[in-house]
Image (cartoon, grey):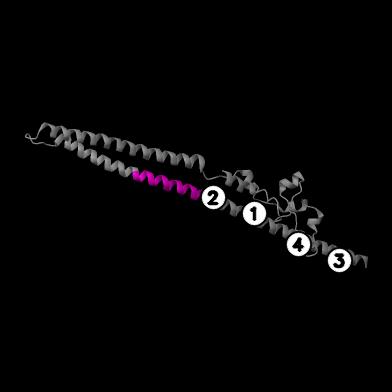
Amino acid sequence: MVFLELAAAGTAAQTVFGYNRQNFEFDRTIQIRQEILKIKLQMKRFELFRQDIRDLVKLTVDRMDLYHLVGALCMQFIIVFLTKGRVQASAPPFLLSLFLLTNACAFIYLLLAVWMSMHASIASHSFGVRLLTRFVRLPILSKQQIDNLTFKLKDFEKHGVSDLLRVPFLNKNRNEWRSPEELQQGGDVAPIGAEGAEPLRPTTASAYLLTA
């Protein structure tokens, strides 16, 4: 009789242990998927930021290049007027002076316009490159952060008996799975999903993406 009771208790303990082990594997798999989704969303977010910067820079560069082209063509017309232009000999001197003065002023203003448009195009492109290379670079995870996106089933064995042999439906408290770092430190954490609970260690990767 005692042997049967011990066998029944062992079978029940084995069943509960297997159930909690599968629960641990399922919870960790879901959490890893959530962390990977967060990383993908943050990468997509930074890609959108970089595309916005490229669009804004392209708008300025294209407009300035158009001004540059139009200004250069107008300067060519002014040079043609000053070199090949002919004024009738009977024209009064003040009219000839006015013709030369207006052409010279137009050439100077067009030269300034071409120079400013070229400077604005180069400055806009340089500022866009500076933003893309120093402020909105795609964040790259370190090896440690990538390693934190994995889990091992042997970590399940490091939890307490209350987690390893938690009876479903009878114990309403959820399993308090802890990350490998927290198991090494021996710290206490709130149950997964509870208010104020700290997420798994892989969240540092998402935090890096948010603050990069």
- Along the line of sight, the residue nearer the viewer: 202 or 134: 134
Name the main secondary structure of what is drawn in magenta: helix
Q: Position of residue 40 (x, y in %)?
A: 56, 52
The residue at which mark 2 appears reads as 43
Which of the marked residues, 4 or 2, is nearer the chain's N terminus? Answer: 4
Q: Position of residue 162 (x, y in %)?
A: 81, 56
Q: CA distance from mark 3 to mark 2?
A: 52 Å
Mark in the foreground, 1 or 3:
1
Mark in the foreground, 4 or 3:
4
Q: CA distance from mark 1 to mark 3?
A: 36 Å
Mark in the foreground, 4 or 2:
2
- Along the line of sight, the residue nearer the viewer: 118 or 23: 118
Q: Position of residue 50 (x, y in %)?
A: 48, 47
Local SS, label 2: helix
Q: CA distance from mark 1 to mark 4?
A: 20 Å
**Left or right: where 66 falls relative to 100:** right
Q: Position of residue 147 (x, y in %)?
A: 64, 47
The residue at which mark 1 appears reads as 32
Q: Which mark is residue 19?
A: 4
Q: Which mark is residue 8?
A: 3
The magenta span reads 46-63
